[in-house]
Image (cartoon, helix red, strand yellow):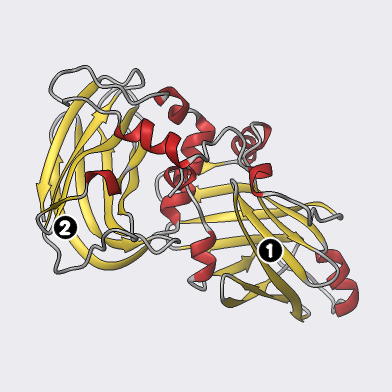
Amino acid sequence: MNMRRSFGALVGAVALSVSLVACGGGSGTPDLAEMRDEFVGTWELVSMETESTTYDEDDVASMAEAGMLVTLDLDEGGDLIYNELGTQHEGTWSVESEDALELDIAGSTIDVPYANDQLTLDVPAGIMTFEKASDTPNMDRQPEDNAGGALTDEEDQKDDEKDVDDPDSGDTDLGELADRFTDEAIVAQDLYVMDIEKTADLDVTMADDETARIVVTGIGTDFEGDTGYMLTIENRSDQDLYIENIATELDGEDVYDYATVARVIKAGETADAFLFFDSSVCTLTEDSSCYFAVGLFDIDANIVAAYEATI
């Protein structure tokens, strides 16, 4: 597990066989060989829309300026590299027809319609639009090339996320929490939750007061195969808040060290989050019995509210 998972990852959506849908239309019948040459290069994310937030080109450009990129590199030999904020996978690609590519990535073969020089990744939680940024692919791209300032060290994640005192004391230390409130970090967090595959529906309200409404909407699985609870959080306060788990028991066992939710919810807005369990230690199912508590913190790591639920 690494910190980037709290920020987001999308390759699981590819592995789950979602498709890249073309934007716009074209005319004529292009030569397939020439069209292949047009695809060779680096494609970059230029905009993104989730159920709660729209990130336009300026927003994504700001993220790119911070070194946080989502790219698809296609070379002339048919190889590809997909890198999302430091999560990198390799695969192959080919021209399937005059208006479609075929990608083989993360064990899945996906048809990719194309038109108007723009590719749009359409997943249940949102839409991502890519445009070609360079005719020369970077096939030497390293995972960290797209990570920007995102933390990647597993120990840093555990130190930051588990350094939590008594939530009732008002003296909670979550490390460099302010870094998670940046626009770039919030975009990355959106990318992660876009990837979650729901495996069971739930409707459990664990908070409904002047500070927040928190509803457990289902059980899901992320791109690494970790299971967990899908949450929808409405921030009713006048300040941005950060949600973190502060106690977790699964089937009678204390699994706090192996359960993570990390998400910023802007003031007056609603956002999705995912409380995931490390699959190397435990797995959440519809038959599981789980108690967990979460805290809402401000940018200075002060506890604002705490809630609990038993499912």
Q: For this view, does 207 lie left or right of residue 280?
A: left
Q: Amino acid at mark 2?
A: Asp
Can residue 50 be seen in the rendering of this structure? no
Report the disc number at residue 203.
Answer: 2
The residue lying at 14 percent from left, 37 percent from top is: 307
Instruction: Please name the residue that numbered disc 1 is placed on.
Output: 24
Q: Dot 2: few (<14), some (14–19), or many (≥20) neighbours within 10 Å? A: few
Is residue 261 at all visible to an observer of this figure? yes
Residue 255 horizontal/vertical position (percent) = 21, 49
Dot 1 or dot 2, earlier in sequence = 1
Looking at this view, is 24 or 92 the one in front? 92
Label 1 with label 2: CB-CB less than 8 Å:
no
Return the x and y of residue 177 as percentages of the image width and height: 40, 25
Q: Amino acid at mark 1?
A: Gly
The secondary element bearing badge 1 is classed as loop
The percent coordinates of residue 293 (x first, y second) are 16, 41
Please give the name of the residue rendered at 34% of the width and 34% of the height, measured from the top-left corner: 161
Foreground residue among 165 and 124? 165
Whole-number angstrom distance, CA of label 1 to CA of label 2: 38 Å
Q: Is label 1 or label 2 in front?
A: 2
The quadrant of the rendering that contains the C terminus is bottom left
Front one among 277 and 67: 277
Query: What residue is shown at x 18% (from left), y 61% (from top)?
Result: 202
